[in-house]
Amino acid sequence: MQVRRSHLNFDDLTLRANPAAMVETLVPGSACADRYSDVPESTMFSGEAAIVANAIPVRRLEFAAVRFCARQALRRIGMPGAPILPDADGVPRWPVGVVGSMTHCKGYRAAVVARSDRLRGIGIDAEPHGALPDPARDLVLREEERVRLPELAAADPDVHWDRVIFCAKEAVYKACFPSTRVWLDFSDISVTLHAEGAFDAHLLVAERNRLAGRWAVDRGIVVAATSVTS
């Protein structure tokens, strides 16, 4: 896995209040679309509908809405709408010349895309803004991350910092896996959060490679995003 630190320039106050703006300004040339509601299943291409034909209604609506967002984002970089089907590993197959990432959770769906000559990968993850259950905390957090939680809580007690770490690790995985096909456990990524809305991620199984990203909280949703340069 060969990743390099992304160089980002953001308005922190804007990003903390607006997840879509955070993702959209991840790097020049990227585009994002998000929704806080679903769309009709009829917005799917037939191939997409076939993938979730036997799924429960909630799953079909999530699948349709996040692809609706993806096509909106694609149009913003000059690409036509097309079916976005998963490969054997569940990774979305983007149009040639495009990298992207999608995420959905209760009450929120989003997608971000960029031209592949600008980026090697993008990762985005969204979660309800709540504390991780104890079993999940034990799985997700490394010891050095636990040690930093009291300091972060003192900086902003309204943020569920363990959940932000979870989102950041998911975003890192999504950014890296499509090009490397290297499976990462939570313990393989060490995240350092910054209270102003940034994070650094150290991939312990990737020759000390590092990524940088952003996070935001809005409307009860925490979103994290990162990228891998070409």
Image: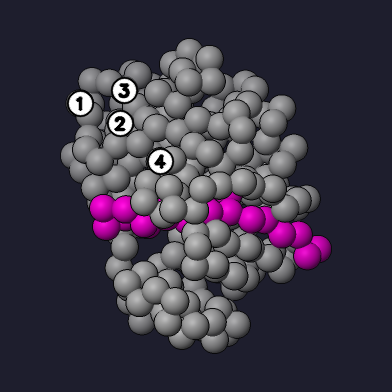
Tag 1 secondary structure = loop
Tag 3 secondary structure = loop
Amino acid residing under circle 2: Ala
Q: Which mark is residue 44?
A: 3
Toward the viewer: 95 or 86?
95
Q: Which mark is residue 102?
A: none
Residue at the spot of label 2: 64
Q: Is residue 110 magenta?
A: no
Q: Is residue 11 rendered to the left or right of residue 49?
A: right
Identity of the residue drawn at 81% across and 63% down: 207
Task: State the separation of the CA atoms marked 3 and 1.
Answer: 8 Å
Residue at the spot of label 1: 40
Q: Are marks 2 and 1 in contact (CB under 8 Å)?
A: yes
> Of circles 4 and 3, which is in front?
4
Amino acid residing under circle 3: Met
Q: Earlier in the sequence, mark 2 or mark 3?
A: 3
> Residue 196's spot in the image, x, y percent?
50, 62
